Image (cartoon, rainbow, N blue to C red):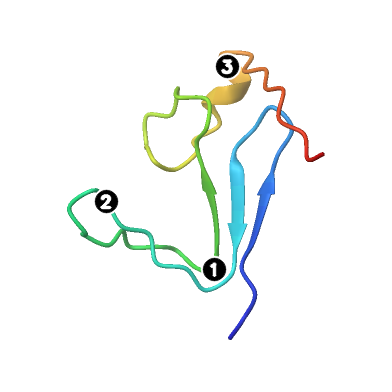
Amino acid sequence: MEEVRIKVRINGPYRIQGPIILEDADGNEFVLPGEIIALCRCGGSKNKPFCDGSHREISFQAETRAK
């Protein structure tokens, strides 16, 4: 099985790389463009759950760090 990697970008999205299936709350699968996607975590994207770069426009600041 291939490895899936999730990277928390500083003040940006979750970048997910690997073979994934993304489902909504009803179990419907999203059509994915490939094996690298970016998921919004600022709440400002107009293309949720995907990142559209809105974090830059709203000056999103996150405190997330691995410990």
Location of mark 1 (residue): 35
Mark 3 vs mark 1, foreground winner is 1
Location of mark 3 (residue): 57
Q: Residue furthest left?
A: 26
Q: Residue at point 64% right, 32% down?
A: 12
Q: Position of residue 63 (x, y in %)?
A: 72, 22
Q: Position of residue 37 (x, y in %)?
A: 53, 55
First in sequence: mark 1 vs mark 2: 2
Q: Residue at point 56% right, 13% down?
A: 58
Distance between the Cα atoms at labels 3 and 2?
26 Å
Location of mark 2 (residue): 24
Three-letter residue code for mark 1: Glu
Three-letter residue code for mark 3: Glu
Q: Quadrant of the N terminus?
A: bottom right
Does the residue at mark 3 contact the one at mark 2 (Cβ under 8 Å)? no
Q: Nearer the viewer, residue 59 or 6?
A: 6
- Residue 26 falls left or right of residue 59: left
Q: Quadrant of the C terminus?
A: top right
Numbered mark located on residue 23 in the image? none
